[in-house]
Amino acid sequence: YGEHISSMTSDAIGLATWARGLTAYLNGQWKTAAELCEKAAETLRDQCTGVTWELSIAHRFLLSAMIYLGETAEVSRRVPALLGAALEQGNVFTATDLRTRLNLIWLAADDPDRAREEVIEALKAWPHEGFHLQHYSAMLALAQIELYTGDTEVVWKHLQGQWQALEDSLLLRIQVLRIEAMHLQARAALATSGKKQSRRLKIAARLAKRITREKAAWADPLANLVRAGIANRNDDKGTASTLLSEAAIAFKARDMELYAAASRRRLGELLGGDHGQQLISEANAWMASQRIKNPDAMTRMLAPGF
């Protein structure tokens, strides 16, 4: 009886911590989310039974929070073991999530072909009917691969072809996902903007405004990063530099180190000279410490418009 009570207590503690971690993630509190989801995963794995789904979700939110924190080296270390175990167990749910949601690790390794293969394999195993969270994660992964490789018109057509299905799925009712999706679309608009596509700068500007209206502190620097790209496309280097500087500071305050590094790198490119080169070198060194092999391509994916 005592063992049964102890098991129930462990389940309650694990699930309560799990719920708090997910709540922190949905509020954009990346560091808190990572810490709580790590604790929840440890409790669920070591002290509970029959919690395979809950453990998968804990890992999903833990690793997703770590991506926002810029901890790509640690995520790159963890994902292969988790993916190998999921494939061995026939756990399609977890394998699909790891291959799509955490797809950035293969871009960090400068292997976009492998990144694309992982998404394709995930989609082969996942049901084609409807539009699920997994389809959104695959859309996000493929779009980021295309931004990374510079296939800009492909990414625009890709997003336009799936956006209605995404809206119909009601997934955009989730704020964190809605902001992420809007920022992805804004990045695609910026990447494909130019003299022949000035209309897409207006689309990017509207999306930046909508992101700001969400009143989520973690999202404000994302909007400024988009606005910096718009200013740069319009040859307003002064405004672009100011917005990049503000974004870099705000990203760091929100523990979003990868975005902060990309912002500093773009700022360095605009400023030029010794100071500009120093910013680029510091950003490159930080990315290298996180096992990011191609800082230029990673920055192109995160901060297009330059």
Image (cartoon, grey):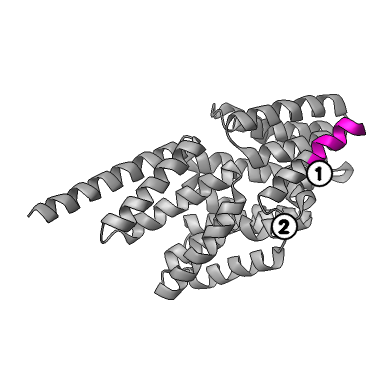
Which residue lies under the disc numbered 2?
146
- Magenta run includes residue 192: no
Instruction: Residue under label 1, please give it.
Output: 193
Q: Secondary structure at mark 1?
A: loop
Residue 39 pos. (x, y %) = 38, 46
196 displayed left or right of 32? right
User: x and y percent of residue 104 in the render?
Assistant: 62, 55
Q: Relative to 245, is 41 on the left or the right?
A: left
Q: Secondary structure at mark 2?
A: helix
Above/below status of 14 relative to 92? above
Is residue 278 within the magenta segment? yes
Which stretch did the figure color magenta?
271-281
Residue positioned 77% across, 32% down in the render: 228
Please identify the dominant SS of the magenta region: helix
Compared to 305, does 156 lie above or below? below
Quadrant of the rendered image containing residue 138: bottom right
Residue name at image x 34 percent, y 54 percent? 54
Residue 211 position within the rendered picture, expressed as x and y whole percent measured from the top left: 60, 33
Q: Are marks 2 and 1 in contact (CB under 8 Å)?
A: no
For residue 230, say whether it is visible.
yes
